[in-house]
Amino acid sequence: MNALKLDFAKMGGLIPAVVQDIETGEILMLAFQNQEAFDQTVATKEAHFFSRSRQKLWKKGETSGNVLRVVGVLADCDDDSIIIKVAHDANLKVCHTGARSCFFKKVL
């Protein structure tokens, strides 16, 4: 198991998890992990998250088939946020709207 001790306490048991394409550097999504989701991600090398609306653990792609293969995880300097670097099929649609990335709405 990973020796890193993430600080899940700051946000009530959750940490932000930014998902980034390993090849392009594109940010694909932001989700949250609790300790169990983090442990499952490390153990299986597939992205798992905690759904704040459903209050349960979920594996990305469990219903859509759009599984994210984890190739690296980086923690920030405070150990309370992570970047999950993923590899996937080029045609993968990560967003539940059908878009490749959840970040497609231009603000500025």
Image (cartoon, rainbow, N blue to C red):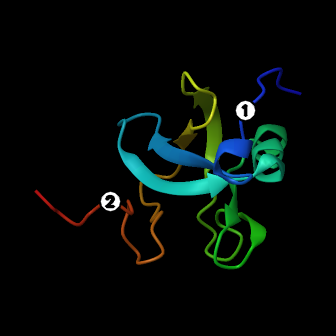
Question: With respect to residue 100, does 14 lie above or below?
Answer: above
Residue 20: x and y, percent?
46, 42
Q: Is residue 69 left or right of residue 106?
A: right
Q: Residue at the right extreme?
A: 1
Instruction: Specify the quadrant of the image occupied by residue 24.
Output: top left
> Observer-nearest residue: 72 or 38?
38
Residue 106: which disc?
A: none
| Residue beneath disc 2 | 103
Q: Position of residue 106 (x, y in %)?
A: 16, 62
Side of 31 where 93 appears, left or right: left
Dot in front, 1 or 2:
1
Residue 50 sits in quarter: bottom right
Under mark 2, the amino acid is: Phe
In the image, what residue occupies the spot 83% across and 43% down?
Answer: 39
Residue 105 or residue 108, whichever sits in front: 108
SS at circle 2: loop
Q: Residue at x 56, y 57 (%)?
A: 31
Mark 1 lies on a secondary structure that is loop
Residue at horizontal 55 percent and vertical 41 percent from the top: 86
* Picture quarter with the C terminus: bottom left
C-alpha distance separating marks 1 and 2: 26 Å
Residue hosting label 1: 6
Quadrant housing the N terminus: top right
Q: Callout 2: 10 Å neighbours few (<14), some, many (20+)?
A: few
* Residue 77 image point, x, y percent: 55, 21
Of callouts 1 and 2, which one flags the residue occurring earlier in the amino acid sequence?
1
* x and y percentages locating residue 48 in the rendered image: 71, 55
